[in-house]
Image: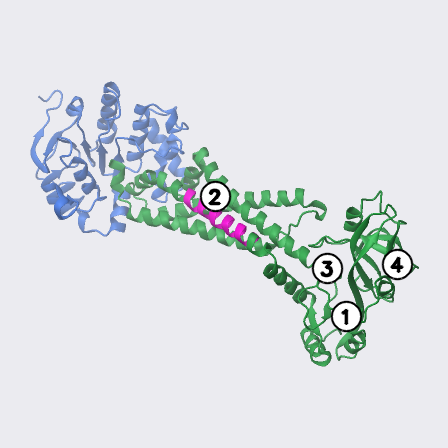
């Protein structure tokens, strides 16, 4: 009877397409909105993930990565002295204004990396050599800085600009993930970074560290916290802390959460209702099958097969469309779009659940169906 | 045709069926006694609302009765649990409806194969047998047509083929000519009598159409929930 069930489903093309459209729209809406939301969250912690280091040591009261709370410069040595730490390096991060040759000012995030190792450097360099930032007055930019500061005709390798009246010469352009604030990032060495910025009592923003091989990272983090009194986080935990801060302190969480929830409810309601109506419209046909001797179990199996077939097809098409949207609009990292397997799995489970629920409601209707309906 | 000494294929005794409750309760069948024999075509006639379709549904086991007993082919149908009754119905009965009730997404051959598929017969074998049956009802050249591309008469022929494909012992027809014009109604009844009627099968036809009365062997008149008379219909050459 599976064959009959599928023929009934596909046979009325208009009804089937309407059903498929409802499910596809629901899936597409949820996956698209969910991916944009998660993409934004990824952007909010881009200043952590772009550096790709395992342990971040911070001021104990730190709330999120962009809210720098400087720590004493002795922190680097104190962290290095903690048992289980393989290495620890300083990191400067702060906001500054860059003045271009054409007189324009742009706010930038100055990132100072330890000169001996350049730990925290971007993995991919688009132009020039990143190591050249060791040269006098040399800096590297990320691709978003080039875009924000006027494009490649204004800023490129060799361009000279000023940071706090001091010369900065671009020697490399690196590829990074866009950040939430989209402030251009200028990389240089830690020592030069603190020369660029106005004098402050404390200039060390973070200490980046790594646990020795074989030593659990969680243990090392506990020791750093206990022995230095500083904050210490894994890259993931610091990223999560930043995401939670954004959700709590901006309207993004509520706005997107509402959109996704509404999309979910509306989408699933459309899906459930459409499928239920589809079954109700076929009730007389099911009544005829019941009169001909088809058991309720057989009919229930037919309805479940129809529900899951159309559900999975709608899921595939919906995810495909959402992915195509992401591919076309988020190409090059211009739009936040992170389609994760967790989101896809969640939507799949939700969709199959709603298919199961609407199929079950229809099956209940069938159980109560008097086959005598066919004589009316 | 029928021999009162042989056991009835359908034996209804004191059958009562009501709808609604308390003030709105309507008793549709008020103690029906009826025997239907193998080899005969019984017409069930009477005024609208007299209980014909209700009795048909009760005999088919798709409507529970309130009181009385219905035996079909020796099986006390009204005592069987619903699942067994459904299986029994699938194995022993065929149905022809006023509105045909063909599945619109299936071709004529596929529609005819449905009762066999319900009996878990393989699709290839079911379709083969369906094609044989369609040939018998004169639709050999319409096997792959969808119902919407067939005329009313042709759709009813498909319905007849579907009802007969699993060789039922009891063929139940509810107003089979009501949706057809006069000539087509005659053709369908002729076909039912030729193909449907058999020594080991009984056919029950509910009808209002007096133009087809001569196709029956007996005619039971059901009025106001009671069988008021049963008459033998003289066949051509025997009158």
Q: Nearer the viewer, residue A138 or A168?
A: A168
Q: Of label 2 and label 1, which has the lower sequence position? A: 1
- Which chain comes out green in the rendered image? A
Instruction: Say which residue label 2 marks.
Output: A310
Instruction: Say which residue label 4 marks.
Output: A133
Q: What secondary structure do most residues of the magenta stretch adopt?
A: helix
Q: How far apart, in angstroms, are the residues tagged by discs 2 and 1?
A: 53 Å
Secondary structure, mark 2, is helix
Per the rendered image, the range of residues in magenta is A256-274
**Residue B48 at x, y percent in the picture:** 15, 31
Q: Name the tint of chain B in the rendering.
A: blue
Q: Of label 3 and label 1, which has the lower sequence position? A: 3
Instruction: Say which residue label 3 marks.
Output: A47
**As drawn, is B192 to the left or to the right of A70?**
left
Quarter of the image holding residue B118? Answer: top left
In the image, what residue occupies the spot 24% across and 18% down?
Answer: B183
| Mark 1 crowdedness (10 Å alpha carbons): few <14, some 14-19, many ≥20 | many
Labels in figure, total: 4
Q: Which of pointers 2 and 1 indicates the residue nearer the eye?
A: 1
Q: Nearer the viewer, residue B198 or A34?
A: A34
Quarter of the image holding residue A67? Answer: bottom right
**Residue A190 at x, y percent in the picture:** 84, 65
In the image, what residue occupies the spot 50% across and 54% down?
Answer: A349
Image quadrant occupied by the N terminus of chain A: top left
Q: Nearer the viewer, residue A242 or A119?
A: A242
Q: Which mark is residue A207?
A: 1
Give me the chain letter of mark 3: A
Q: Is residue B133 above or below residue A299?
A: above
In the image, what residue occupies the spot 82% across and 64% down?
Answer: A113
Q: Residue A267: within the magenta?
A: yes
Q: Is residue A298 above or below residue A63?
A: above
In the image, what residue occupies the spot 58% across and 47% down?
Answer: A32
């Amino acid at each position: 009877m599976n064959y009959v069930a599928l023929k009934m489903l596909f046979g009325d093309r208009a009804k089937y397409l309407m059903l498929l459209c409802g499910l596809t729209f629901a899936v597409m809406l949820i996956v698209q909105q969910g991916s944009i939301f998660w993409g934004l969250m990824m952007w909010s912690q881009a200043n952590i993930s772009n550096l790709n280091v395992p342990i971040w040591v911070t001021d104990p009261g730190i709330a999120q990565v962009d809210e720098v709370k400087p720590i004493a410069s002795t922190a680097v040595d104190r962290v290095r002295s903690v048992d289980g730490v393989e290495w620890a390096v300083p990191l400067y991060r702060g906001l500054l204004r860059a003045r271009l040759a054409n007189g324009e000012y742009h706010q930038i995030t100055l990132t100072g990396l330890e000169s001996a190792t350049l730990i925290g450097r971007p993995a991919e360099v688009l132009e020039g050599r990143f190591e050249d930032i060791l040269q006098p007055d040399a800096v590297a930019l990320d691709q978003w800085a080039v875009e924000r500061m006027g494009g490649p005709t204004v800023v490129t390798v060799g361009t000279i600009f000023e940071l706090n009246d001091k010369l900065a010469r671009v020697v490399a352009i690196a590829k990074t993930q866009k950040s939430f604030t989209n402030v251009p990032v200028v990389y240089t060495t830690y020592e030069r970074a603190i020369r660029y910025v106005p004098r402050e009592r404390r200039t060390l923003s973070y200490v980046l560290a790594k646990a020795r091989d074989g030593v659990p990272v969680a243990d090392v983090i506990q020791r750093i916290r206990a022995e230095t009194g500083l904050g210490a986080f894994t890259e993931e935990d610091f990223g999560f802390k930043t995401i939670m801060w954004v959700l709590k302190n901006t309207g993004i969480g509520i706005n997107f959460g509402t959109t996704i929830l509404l999309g979910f409810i509306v989408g699933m309601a459309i899906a459930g209702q459409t499928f239920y109506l589809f079954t109700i419209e076929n009730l007389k046909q099911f009544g005829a099958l019941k009169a001909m001797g088809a058991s309720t179990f057989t009919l229930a199996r037919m309805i479940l097969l129809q529900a899951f077939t159309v559900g999975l097809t709608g899921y595939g098409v919906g995810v495909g469309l959402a992915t195509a949207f992401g591919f076309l609009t988020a190409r090059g990292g211009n739009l936040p779009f992170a389609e994760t397997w967790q989101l896809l799995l969640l939507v799949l489970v939700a969709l199959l659940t709603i298919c199961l629920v609407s199929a079950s409601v229809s099956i209940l209707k069938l159980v109560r169906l008097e086959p005598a309906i066919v004589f009316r | 045709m029928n021999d009162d000494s042989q056991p009835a294929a359908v034996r209804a005794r004191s059958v009562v069926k009501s709808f609604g409750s308390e003030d709105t309760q309507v008793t549709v069948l008020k103690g029906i006694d009826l025997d239907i024999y193998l080899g005969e075509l019984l017409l069930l006639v009477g005024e609208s609302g007299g209980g014909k379709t209700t009795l048909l549904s009760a005999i088919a086991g798709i409507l529970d009765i309130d009181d009385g007993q219905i035996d079909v082919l020796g099986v006390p149908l009204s005592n069987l649990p619903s699942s067994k009754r459904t299986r029994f119905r699938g194995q022993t009965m065929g149905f022809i409806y006023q509105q045909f009730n063909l599945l619109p997404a299936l071709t004529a051959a596929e529609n005819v194969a449905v009762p066999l598929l319900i009996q878990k017969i393989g699709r290839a074998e079911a379709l083969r047998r369906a094609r044989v049956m369609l040939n018998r009802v004169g639709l050999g050249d319409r096997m792959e047509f969808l119902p919407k591309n067939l005329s009313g008469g042709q759709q009813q022929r498909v319905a007849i083929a579907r009802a007969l494909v699993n060789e039922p012992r009891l063929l139940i027809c509810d107003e089979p000519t009501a949706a057809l014009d006069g000539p087509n109604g005659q053709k369908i009844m002729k076909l039912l009598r030729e193909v449907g009627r058999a020594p080991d099968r009984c056919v029950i036809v509910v009808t209002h159409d007096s133009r087809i009365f001569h196709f029956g062997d007996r005619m039971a008149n059901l009025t106001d929930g009671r069988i008021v008379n049963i008459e033998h219909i003289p066949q051509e050459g025997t009158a």
